[in-house]
Amino acid sequence: MNTGDVAWILVSSALVLLMTPGLALFYGGLARSKNAASTIMYSFMSMGIVGVVWVLWGYSLAFGPDIGKFVGDLSYFGLNGVSASEPGPYADNMPHQAFMIFQGMFAIITPALVTGAFAERMKFSSYMIFIVLWVTIVYAPVAHWVWGGGWLGELGALDFAGGNVVHINSGVAALAAAVIFGKRLGFGSEPMEPHNVPMVVLGAGLLWFGWFGFNAGSALSADGNAVNAFVVTNTAAAAGILGWTATAWLLDGKPTVIGAASGAVAGLVAITPAAGFVGPMPAIIIGLVAGILCDLAARFLVRLNLDDALSVWGVHGIGGTWGALATGLFVGVGFGGIAAFTDASRAEQILNQVISIVATWAWAFVMTFVIFWVIKVTIGLKVSDNSEAVGLDITEHGETAYRL
C-alpha cells in the first residue's frame, strides 16, 4: 500500500463529505425563508441515515461479490471482512475501509441532491423512509453496475466519478418526484424566489471546493490522473459560470448571482464522468455547454408546469446526461489518448455511453416513482396545505431558521 495514496483518499473523503453541508446551504438559500431550516435538514439527515445504512448493507450491495452483474451480495454486511489495514478488491494501494468510506460519501450526497425537487412540501417522517429505500433500491444497484463489477462496467461505459451513479440517478429521481408530488401552493402565481443569495453562493463555493475530492479523489491515487482531474474540474466549473450567466443575461436581460452559482454547479456536474478521461480544452466545452443546457432545461420544466422546486433535474439530470455523452465524445482528447481508456472506437464508446444513460434514466425514474407511490398510498408524502402555507420549519421541526 502507498501511504501517500491513503492520505489523499482520506482527505478526499473528507472533502466529499463537506459537499453535503455545502449542498444544505445551497438548497437552503434557494428555498423560501419559512422552509430554510427544513431544507437544510434534508441534507444533514442524509449524513446520518446513509452514514449508517452504508456500513450495514449499502456498501455490500454496491461493492460486494457480484450477483448476476446486477447487485452485490451481503457478504460485507456491517463491514464484515472489510479491513482497515489490508487492501480490498477495488484498490490494492489502500485499505479496504479507505475505499469504502470514500464511496460512502458519494452515497450520502446523492439522495440529498434529490431533496431539492420536493423541498417545501414533503413530510419529514416520509423522507426518512424514502432515503433508506432509495439508497438501497436505486443507488446501490447503479453503483454496482458501473463501479462494482456490474454490467455497465463490463460493457465498457465510462463514468470516472459519478455522472451516472450520482447525477443522472439523482436528477432523474427528482423528475419522478416533481411528477408525483405535484405543485407547491401558489406555484406559477406567487413569487418563490430564493430567500438568501449569499447562502447560495457560500453553498456553491463549498460544493466547488469539495468537488476536488469528488473528482480528483476518484483517481484513487495521488498521481497525474488526480492532477488532471483536479484541473479539468476547476476549468469546467469556470466555463459553466460563463455559459449559464450568458444565457440568463441574453434571455432575462440581467446577469444574476444565482445564475452564476448554478452555472458553476452545472459545470461541475457535467465534468464529473469525464474528469479522468479528458484534458482542459474539452473541459471548457463541457462546462460551457452544461451552463447553457442546464439553464434552458430548468426553464423548460417550468414551461411544462412541473414543480422541481430547486431545479435538480435541470442541473443534475441534464448536466449528468450531457457529461456522460461528452465522455464518449471527448475521451482521450487532450489527455492520454483514447486507447489509454478504452479498447472501443469512439463511435462504439459513444454507443456504450448512450446505453448507460438510457439504463440509468429508466431505473432511476421507474424505481423512484414506485418508492414515492408506495409511501404516498401508505403513510402519505406531503404535508397538509395548512402546514405548507405556514412553512415546514415550524410545522415539521418546531423552529425557524432566523430569529430576527
Image (spheres, rainbow, N blue to C red):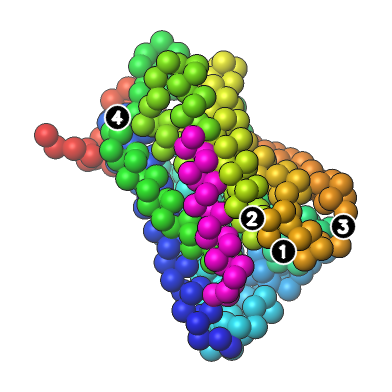
Going from N to C along the chain, the mark reached first, 2 or 1, is 2
In the picture, which quadrant includes the N terminus? bottom right
Within the magenta stretch, is there residue 226?
yes
Q: Which of marks 3 and 1 is in front?
A: 1
Residue 253 visible in image: yes
Q: Position of residue 120 (x, y in %)?
A: 39, 31
Query: Under tag 2, what secondary structure?
Result: loop
Residue placed under numbered mark 2 in the picture: 279
Amino acid marked by disc 3: Ala
The Cα–Cα distance between marks 4 and 3, rounded to whole angstroms, is 48 Å
Q: Quadrant of residue 139?
A: bottom right
Amino acid marked by disc 1: Gly
Amino acid marked by disc 4: His
Residue placed under numbered mark 1 in the picture: 336
Residue at the spot x=60%, y=17% of the render? 304
Q: Where is residue 204 in the image (x, y as percent from the top left)?
A: 39, 45
Q: Nearer the viewer, mark 4 or mark 1?
A: 1
The Cα–Cα distance between marks 2 and 3, rounded to whole angstroms, is 19 Å
Amino acid marked by disc 2: Gly
Residue placed under numbered mark 4 in the picture: 195
The residue at the far top in this view is: 189
